[in-house]
Image: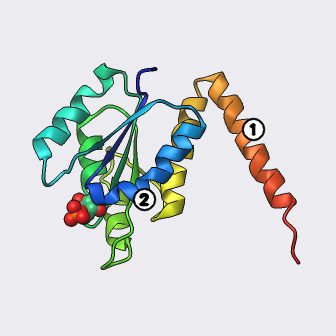
Amino acid sequence: MSKPLVAIVMGSLSDLDAVKDTFEVLDSFQIPYEAKVLSAHRTPDETIKYAKEAYDNGIKLFIAAAGGAAHLAGVIAGCSTLPVIGIPMKTSTLDGLDSLLSIVQMPAGVPVATVAIGKAGCKNAGVLAATIIGAFDSDMHDKIVSYKEEMKTKVLSSVIE
Ligand code: RP5
């Protein structure tokens, strides 16, 4: 089995169902990943340790999913030199707007590439990871070309009855 290139971190096991869409996209691009539950609030020491060690462990980028006061992606971005994609989880109280603002409003110098709330965001985190890898890896780039071509064909073959 290949070494993981992407580290997917979620704030709670309650995020897993949504994040399965990200797994599916990474699987479809054959990108090796590892996934963990770590929380910026409930397990801060372990989260920081994991983030700091990831580069030396061969990880190329993080995907961090969290909801509510969602500080996970930001904490990882603060203590890692790797790119971080943040997924705002939909929440029952504020529909995920809380998660979105917590993840997207990072201070200058510490970016988190934030995707949409909900299903589109979970999928797009995987597609964005593949696209970033594809910028440096021609096989992955070819897969992105095919992916876009398939999407185009699907839209253009839509039939309105
Ligand atoms: C965040 O709080 C998690 O990412 C999750 O989306 C949210 C709720 O967590 P649980 O209370 O369900 O564990 O840290």
Q: x, y percentage for residue 53?
A: 23, 26
Q: x, y percentage for residue 29?
A: 59, 35
Residue at x-position 57% and y-position 45%? 127
The quadrant of the rendering that contains the C terminus is: bottom right
Q: Mark 1 and mark 2: span between their CA atoms?
A: 25 Å
What secondary structure is marked by label 2? Answer: helix
Residue 146, which numbered label?
A: 1
* Residue 56 drawn above or below residue 18: above
Q: Nearer the viewer, residue 148 or 13?
A: 13
Residue at x-position 37% and y-position 63%? 89
Observer able to see residue 69: no
Q: Amino acid at mark 1?
A: Ser
In which image quadrant can residue 144 be found? Answer: top right
Residue at x-position 38% and y-position 61%? 88
Observer able to see residue 20: yes
Left or right, residue 142 beside residue 107:
right
What secondary structure is marked by label 1? Answer: helix
Q: Tell me the crowding category of disc 2: few under 14, some 14 to 19, or many 20 or more residues within 10 angstroms, Cα based.
A: some
